[in-house]
Amino acid sequence: MTTATVTIRAALPGDAVAIARIYNEGIEDRIATFETRLRTPGDIEARIAGGERLLVAERSGAVVGFAGWAPYSDREAYAGVGNYTVYVARGARGARVGSALMREVVAEAETAGLWKLLSIILATNEASIALARRHGFREVGRHRRHGKLDGEWRDAVLVELSLGAAAE
Ligand SMILES: CC(C)(COP(=O)(O)OP(=O)(O)OC[C@H]1O[C@@H](n2cnc3c(N)ncnc32)[C@H](O)[C@@H]1OP(=O)(O)O)[C@@H](O)C(=O)NCCC(=O)NCCS
């Protein structure tokens, strides 16, 4: 485990190559997401240009993780609910990079006026469930057969964290 300092900053268009690589590791590992289509840096640039809030974690000058949130729904009534995402490069997992990203995502979401962050996590993704729990998220429940991964039904766990006035 490394002890090098982790810096969290806003993602820039130039980070798209690293973000795509890290996201694709999560896709290839078949642990993080129901998505199976690998992403290109262009896909990530479009997300950043489209206004999605993405943060990156830098360690020793290299991008080793990213996180952010996207709107949960386009309905106005849910404008304060964000769906978060967090990915750490294979070689950097288990070294608190995810925790550093998560802390900043929660702080930024609260400052931006969100009243809730949530995520739907594959039930087998122990690291992601542990990360959510560590940062105060509660498990709302388990979606049975929420989607198929490589043709197999998979369950998913819904987690949420209330923010700001909603947390009082
Ligand atoms: C999930 C992920 C973001 C966690 O980030 P990380 O930097 O590895 O996690 P951290 O080192 O900050 O540890 C966070 C917590 O998870 C626990 N944890 C980490 N890896 C774990 C593992 N493989 N199994 C069980 N718990 C684990 C840690 O012990 C810690 O809990 P604690 O604070 O109660 O001790 C990272 O493992 C990852 O990118 N995985 C692949 C992509 C992914 O699954 N993304 C989430 C999609 S929902």
Image (tube, rainbow, N blue to C red):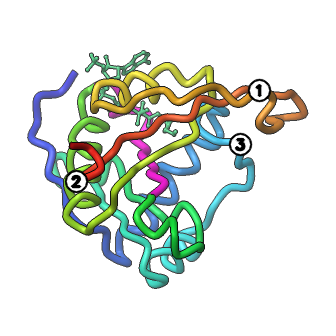
Splitting the image into 4 quarters, where does residue 4 fall? top left
Q: Which residue is mark 1?
A: 144
Q: Residue placed at 28% from the left, 53% from the top?
A: 105
Amino acid at the residue labelled 1: Arg
| Sequence order check, earlier mark of 1 and 2 | 1
Tell me the quadrant of the picture where the N terminus can be found: top left
Badge number at residue 164: 2
Question: Taking 167 as reference, is 17 above or below it?
Answer: below
Pointer 1 with pointer 2, Cβ within 8 A: no
Q: How far from the left and from the top, in percent, is residue 121?
A: 57, 34
Tell me the quadrant of the picture where the C terminus can be found: top left
Mark 2 crowd level (few <14, some 14–19, many ≥20, 10 Å Cα):
some
Mark 3 crowd level (few <14, some 14–19, many ≥20, 10 Å Cα):
some
Q: Residue placed at 21% from the left, 41% from the top?
A: 100
| Sequence order check, earlier mark of 1 and 3 | 3
Q: How far from the left and from the top, in percent, is residue 115?
A: 34, 56
SS type, badge 1: strand
Badge number at residue 85: none
Gap in Å between the C-alphas at discs 1 and 3? Answer: 14 Å
Q: Nearer the viewer, mark 1 or mark 3?
A: 1
* Residue 89 is inside the magenta segment: yes
Magenta-tinted stretch: 82-94
